[in-house]
Amino acid sequence: MTYDFDLFVIGAGSGGVRAARFAAGFGARVAVAESRYLGGTCVNVGCVPKKLLVYGAHFSEDFEQAEGFGWSLGQANFDWATLIANKDREIQRLNGIYHDLLVNSGVTLMESHARLLDAHSVEVDGKRITAKHILLATGGWPHIPELPGREHAISSNEAFFLKTLPKRVLVIGGGYIAVEFASIFNGLGAQTSLLYRGELFLRGFDGAVREHLQDELSKRGVVLQFNTDLERIDKQADGSLQVTTKDGRVLHTDCVFYATGRRPMLDNLGLENTGVKLDKRGFIQVDEQYQSSEPSILAIGDVIGRVQLTPVALAEGMAVARRLFKPEAYRPVNYEHIPTAVFSLPTIGTVGLSEEQAKADGHRVSVYESRFRPMKLTLTDSQERTLIKLVVDADNDRVLGCHIVGPEAGEIIQGLAIALQAGATKQMFDDTMGVHPTTAEEFVTLRTPVAS
Ligand code: FAD
């Protein structure tokens, strides 16, 4: 049987673009359908615009701290509309780059919705197109739970396009997107509260990191409320929102921002026309090679719900392209030691195991920790402190986890991820010369364990 294409990719986000470009580079005939925006979540409503907003939010501290270094700036003013317009311009530029990347690699780009018709065909703009392999890279979508007044709440999708900065924001959720947006809104001048139904946010992160961020956000004026959830949201005559919590309290705000998880994007995808199965969480079920229960259909990225990060979607896209069209270069994706940053203010960087996870996995651990005031802040009134933590296997000296909460944590953690990937021991850290004076040098000067 001859097909129109060797590979049809649904979704031109992080994973889909990577798979399509490389498959075309390996000589395959490739088409991509994208219904919304080139570059997907990360470029349009995820990593990129979020980081730009975090940079924007950081200036309020920078201005305050500048005085300690002799600068006087007068009254600083912030204009949300300018930030959003400049952000939009940059995203448009990136959309263009993604367009050119695809087209210049020989990929046929269809800027439309795609729907599966059967195991080898999709429908785009009313036309049936056949392909030997179909790759689902449709990503995820914010999930706002059912509750009265849900329509008054926004998610990250809308936050990037608000016309004005709300005076008061209530962030609901305990994941990384919740703490990042709480930091953004707070840094830009909104009165910000974060409300989470669990004991403490950032479940799965190291306990010391979670507590440190809790202290730092509180110091910056973010009001944190744990062990509580929303019952309902009511719009008031003046446009503000009245929020009732499950424990019966009434709060007033101008914006309720939900960051309570993301569901796989399967809307009108036509899965029912194929044998593709979902796992028990509702994500597309795939095997180790990203093959679904329909052999010609594969899936990668957020829609399989494994690790929902851009570099992981990219790696999965690359693995699929190689496996199908350049098998001699195939390397399985390595899910160990995935470094991550949470771009809260201050930022978290983490790689490897938390102390709690290391213990749960049966390791006997030595823990090294340092908490200090970063040098840059010594001439300022800022009371921010930085946390550095190493989790070490006490039996074989292997470093199991590195954690930092402080400036440039995301930049610092990348290099440490290479060390962990290479199997570095604590002795190797100790034998490494520091870069002085930096925050990062603390990772090679921690001598005394705080707990065993
Ligand atoms: P996506 O990038 O979501 O792309 C899927 C694409 O498929 C979309 O463009 C969509 O329009 C399209 N599509 C869906 N259905 C169809 C259809 N039927 N037909 C045609 N097209 C379709 N990750 C990080 O690593 N670092 C971060 O700092 C970070 N920050 C984030 C901040 C926020 C607010 C959010 C929401 C996410 C963030 N992420 C971050 C996660 C990251 O964005 C995702 O992991 C990544 O984008 C997943 O890539 P993907 O290819 O699986 O899907």
Image (tube, rainbow, N blue to C red):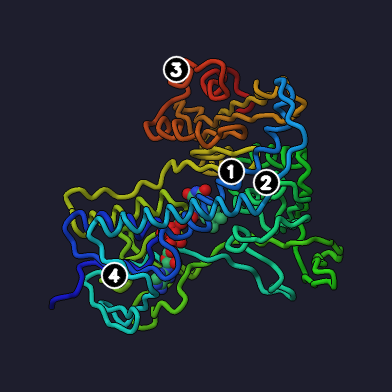
Q: Mark 2 — residue? A: 183
The picture places residue 326, in percent across and down from the top left corner, at 18, 54
Q: In the drawing, what numbered circle is on residue 432?
A: 3
Give amino acid for label 1: Phe
Which element type, helix, strand or loop, lies under badge 2?
Answer: helix
Q: In the drawing, what numbered circle is on residue 343?
A: 1
Give the CA separation, mark 4 to mark 1: 35 Å
The picture places residue 219, in percent across and down from the top left corner, at 77, 38
| 142 and 215: which is toward the camera | 142
Q: Mark 4 — residue? A: 134
- Looking at the image, residue 415 sits to the left or right of residue 99; the answer is right
Q: Is residue 264 above or below residue 369?
A: below
Q: Does any atom of ligand 1 lie closer than 8 Å to the CB of label 1?
A: yes
Q: Which of marks 2 and 1 is nearer the N terminus?
A: 2
Give the CA separation, mark 4 to mark 2: 40 Å
Q: Is residue 303 visible from the viewing direction of this image?
A: no
Q: Which of marks 1 and 3 is nearer the N terminus?
A: 1
| 385 and 451: which is toward the camera | 385
Give amino acid for label 4: Ile
Give the CA separation, mark 3 to mark 4: 48 Å
Which element type, helix, strand or loop, lies under badge 1?
Answer: loop
The picture places residue 324, in percent across and down from the top left corner, at 21, 60
Front tag of 1 and 3: 1
Which element type, helix, strand or loop, lies under badge 3?
Answer: loop
Give amino acid for label 3: Thr
| 431 and 86: which is toward the camera | 86
Q: Residues within 10 Å of mark 1 (few under 14, many from 20)?
A: many
